[in-house]
Image (tube, rainbow, N blue to C red):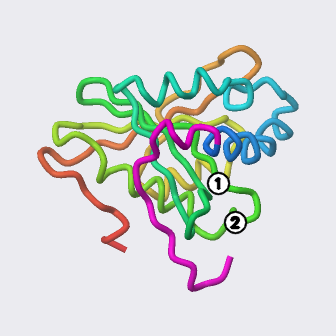
Amino acid sequence: MSEDAEVRIDVVGADHAGEVLTLRRAAFVVEAQLYNDPHIPALTQTLDELIEDMESGATVTLGAWIGPRLVGTIRVGIEGTKATIGRLAVAPDVQGVGIGAQLVFAVLGYLPEDTSEVWAFTGQNSKHNIALYNKAGYEHQFDQVSGDLTYAYLRKILESGAIVDDAAKG
């Protein structure tokens, strides 16, 4: 990716579900190798399940685009005043250049005004992901075992009545 490539972040609809699924699978292969488990949920979700999730009204999927190409996605579940982000995926050939961080920070602009906290979860051994969430202001709360995987859960409390854009703070 060239330094001057502009990344655009916007909501991704179910009409792009095939691209989202392909991108997630490419990105999560590394996680599967890290955990020696090809059955992690991001790799086993079907296209129909993804479309149902994207059309549920309880989630928002954001995408990062470079020109016409989808290069990153993140899923945001909304439940009352709580949001949960997950399935952060960046195309392998553009990982490590800040697209994941841009998606994590962009989530805040797509939350309902009354959102008071945002949770993120990732594999406990995914040190890069945990560091990314920490940099964005998320604090580790607990770990939870699910099958053969242990997930780290992180939380960010939002200021009352104002969604803070930490990226603008520097």
Where residue 36 sits in the image (x, y, percent)?
A: 87, 31
Q: Residue furthest bottom?
A: 4
The three-letter code of the residue at mark 1 reads Val
Describe residue 39's horizontal placement relative to residue 138 as left or right. Answer: right
What number is the disc on residue 49?
none
The boundaries of the magenta stretch are 1-18
Q: Of helix, strand and loop, which one carries label 2?
A: helix
Q: Quadrant of residue 83?
A: top left
CA gap between label 2 and label 1 equals: 7 Å
Question: Badge 2: few (under 14), some or many (20 or more) residues near its Cα, within 10 Å?
Answer: some
At label 1, counting other C-alpha atoms closer than 10 Å, the crowd grade (few under 14, some 14-19, many 20 or more) is many
From the image, tell me which residue sits under label 2.
Answer: 94
Q: Is residue 6 magenta?
A: yes
**Which residue is found at the position 48% from the left and 56% from the top?**
103
Residue at 54%, 62% (x, y): give it: 65
Q: For this rendering, which residue is in front, 8 or 132?
A: 8
Mark 1 element type: strand
Q: Are marks 2 and 1 in contact (CB under 8 Å)?
A: yes
As drawn, the label of residue 90 is: 1
User: Which amino acid type is shown beneath numbered disc 2?
Assistant: Val
Q: Position of residue 124 (x, y in %)?
A: 66, 35
Of residues 141 and 162, the one drawn nearer to the viewer in this rendering: 162
Does the magenta run of residues contain 4?
yes
Q: Quadrant of the N terminus?
A: bottom right
Residue name at image x 82 percent, y 33 percent: 35
| Residue found 64% across the figure and 45% down from its top | 19
Number of numbered discs visible in the structure rendering: 2
Which residue is most to the front?
15
